[in-house]
Amino acid sequence: MLLSRRDFCASELRCTLLGQGFEPVAVQGVIEEFSARGYLDDERYALHFVSQRAERGQGPLRIQRELEQLGVAAPLIEAALTAGEDWARRARELRIRRFGLAPPVHWPDKAKQARFLQYRGFSNDHIRAAMGSEVSDALS
């Protein structure tokens, strides 16, 4: 019933089932069987999670932190984050959507936009690409 609503990673499904009172041995058996049948796939989950969060305007650092908290393996996270997303373009689009097409002129505006993008999970390199190289001094 749970898997019919949305995708789960193995550790998230494990926590959910254990929280509902199922025995740990039974939960482990179900997870192994579902993984073998392809119902449960952490790689697919990570790719979908990254795609969904990127569409919502979140950057790779924030997405990585969320996936780590969910218990997804580090190699799967890295593969999902590098699987085709142009994070600098995403940061630029988000900055333009939030603050307009004109680049910031004054330092307070540059700092405000940089903080916004950092909060969303973009790295300093992505922020520099989104705002222009003149911001690099403000971020250091």
Image: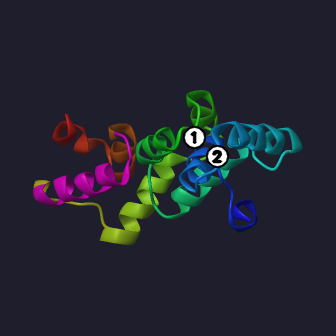
Find the magenta span and give its range: 108-123
Name the residue rendered at 52%, 57% in the picture: 53
- Front residue of 88/76: it is 76
Q: Is residue 100 visible?
A: no
Amino acid of disc 2: Cys
Q: What percent of the width, then of the height, locates residue 129?
A: 39, 45
Q: Main secondary structure of the magenta part?
A: helix
In this rendering, position of residue 6 left or right of residue 119: right
How packed is label 2: few (under 14 Cα within 10 Å), some, or many (20 or more)? many
Q: Can you tell which mark lies on residue 9?
A: 2
Secondary structure under the numbered disc 1 in the rendered image: helix
Query: Which numbered disc covers residue 81?
Result: 1
Of the pair 18 and 72, the residue shown nearer to us: 18
Return the residue found at the far top.
75
Is the C terminus in the top left, top right, bottom left or bottom right quadrant?
Answer: top left
Q: Is residue 114 magenta?
A: yes
